[in-house]
Image (cartoon, helix red, strand yellow):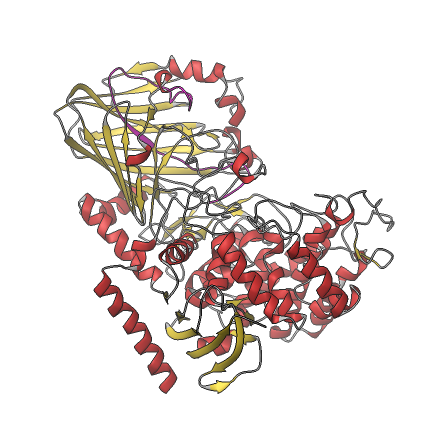
Amino acid sequence: MKFYISSLILTFAFFFSVAISGQEPADYVNPFIGASANIETAGASHGLGKTFPGAAFPFGMAQVSPNTITGGDNGCGYSYEHTSIEGFAFTQMSGVGWYGDLGNLLIMPVTGELKTVAGKPDNTALGYRSAYSKNSEKATAGYYSVLLTDYNIRAEATVAAHGGMLRFTFPESKQSRIQVDLARRVGGTSIYQHVRIVDRQTIRGWMKCTPEGGGWGNGNGKPNYTVYFYMQFSKPFEDCGYWNADIPDDWTRRLWDVTNDRYQQLVSEATIVRNLPQWEGKHIGFFAEYETQQDEIIEVKAGISFVDMQGAEQNFRQEIAAPTFDEMHENAKTAWNSALSKITVSGGTEEQKIVFYTALYHTMIDPRTFMDVDGRYWGGDNRPHTTDKFTRRTIFSGWDVFRCQFPLQTIINPAIVNDLINSMVTLAEENQTGYYERWEFLNAYSGCMIGNPTISILADAFNKGIRGYDLQKAYQYAVKTSERFGNGKRGYSAGENSVSNTLEYAYSDWCMEQLAKNLGNKADVEKYARRAQAYRQIFDPSIGWFRPRNNDGSWQEWPKDGRLKHDYGCVESNLYQQGWFVPHDVDGMVKLMGGKEKTLADLTDFFEKTPSDFLWNSYYNHANEPVHHVPLLFNRLGAPQLTQYWTRYICTHAYHNKVEGLVGNEDVGQMSAWYVLAASGIHPVCPGDTRYEITSPVFDSITILTGAKAIPFTIIAHNNSPENVYIDRILLNGKPYKKYAITHEEILKGGKLELFMKSFL
């Protein structure tokens, strides 16, 4: 009990110091970190962080953010180096590669003649988009502002869970206008839209988005959703109307179609329609016109829903209608302070605190709520459902987030993990597939990436005591998933991605073994334990490494570049990188590789050949997920000092307080979760196992409010400094501790882990 009390005292001391300094956790958030898709800077086609800088709410449905581009491999619709803004959308994806989606309900304030097309990013004269003052751009947790220089309009954005608000400060003009582009979508276009005028200050409508209009994976991710909205303007329209581009029936409308000159020219020649109560079509927009005085403010509020217009209006009336812009902003900041206070840090530099709290912020955008305020959500059977048992959530970037993002949430937000499992179970039931997909997007089974990450999330949650779901049903669907996506009867995966697939499926079968043990299913335990050893089937003793196999069992030809050949038998990696992925049986992997001494030498070489900037490379490629557990393997090889050295080194060199501060795609919280855990001094190797490796913390003190009861667990690094990165000795709750690992159960009990740091080995 005394350690629990001392941890509480440390927590209260932190908040007291914050109150004195005036700095709250949300004040350290810099949403511009990672807000670039620049390929040249990244040195790879995957680009950099691809985060958005606009206003977000913790795990909220809505995100109100500037959009600078519709086309390209740019899931967030924004990149910092772009020089113009085409509008402010109410939905965004965070940090994804592939061709993105959302960016719906695009609103743009303008002056002058009406233009019905956004225009090209490098030529604002052709459309309604505007150049903007980079120096004027400001973003904090729950707020964004910028000066649109073509129109001399200041735009500000803030957000609530199910909608948001824009505040525009206009110049004096007889032709001021607010345009709502209903067709716009980050990765293509919505295929059909509807809008209705409710009164002279209010409109409502919807935008239907399907694969025919591109979107997620340029349609290959099978996106199929409708966004409904209810919107109010603070000033009655002096005039209003619609624009309508009559898209020919035989025109295809995926990303490259809608961004080409032919399509853009047709939209620029759209018909203007006035004096009608409603309009719908394949490519439409709405505009409200005003005569404005200098510095006149007009605000736009909107609630959104993925269920129906009734849901959008209810969300609007409960969360959006009453607060002023400043009140909504303050509400968002309060929500972020509460969310970010799950972890408090002291010590470290100001930059490190900014990087840390921004990383924690990025881990709390998804999986977002997919449910209206009345408990209704749109199900996988294309029908509305209602529940008060859990919050339906969406955007599950499985292959990315099973590694660090969800293990982090098991510690600080177990309810989010429980929600996600319930969401995946009910979705598999509603769509009648009875299995889990590896990348879920707004109910769509996109099939993106590899492995069976939902099984990993399920096993990790259950072994950590997160069990508020139907386990029998969850397991039943996991079995079907494992049988559908797995190494099959031959005992390994053959073909193009032989190594990556075999290793990922072997790991997920180990997760199945853990679930079967918990259910007392001995036959399944034996079956999955055997399958978990599938990694051995693709290890070639003649070369001493993993190697892809053909369908007939023969080895694929060994390439000139050997283990360094990118995409040889692997997904987004090479054999050297992917080969370390046997997290469930490190001892068995090491034995295959020739024993600890040989493996340690090889792993050391792997890191020493890595470039110090950690941009895309052939060795420890922190810019992508397959290697994220690898620095912790030194702990398992009896060289914990190298885990300590390299995790601290990565924290220092791969994460920065700048736009290029993420060396690879944020990937829906994964890249940031890695930093949060490593900087805190604990990190998993194998989700599904309750063990976390102990490593060198960035901060002098970290207090984590753990589990559903928010019990404080404090990690103290005595004598911590940039030089003192090595752990000399450890105390757990005042007693000597000889291990470089700690369990989830020990963390959730609360208490104090003390690390005594030194600068030499």
Compared to 676, does 148 lie above or below? above
* 325 left or right, relative to 131: left
From the top left corner, tell me how far across and down residue 761 is, in percent.
59, 73
Tell me: 445 left or right of 659: right
Residue at position x 74%, y 70% from top? Answer: 596
Count the labels in the image: 0
Q: Is residue 145 magenta?
A: no
Q: Is residue 102 above or below residue 635?
A: above
Residue 241 appears left or right of 402: left
Please state, as top left, top right, bottom left or bottom right, where the N terminus lies in the image: bottom left
367 or 336: nearer the viewer: 336
* Vertical side of 255 occupied by 23: above or below: below
Please give left or right for residue 350 compared with residue 484 in the image. Answer: left
The answer, for residue 248, to whether it is visible in the render is no
Q: Residue at x 73, y 55 (%)?
A: 502
Segment colored magenta: 95-123
578 vs 759: above or below: above
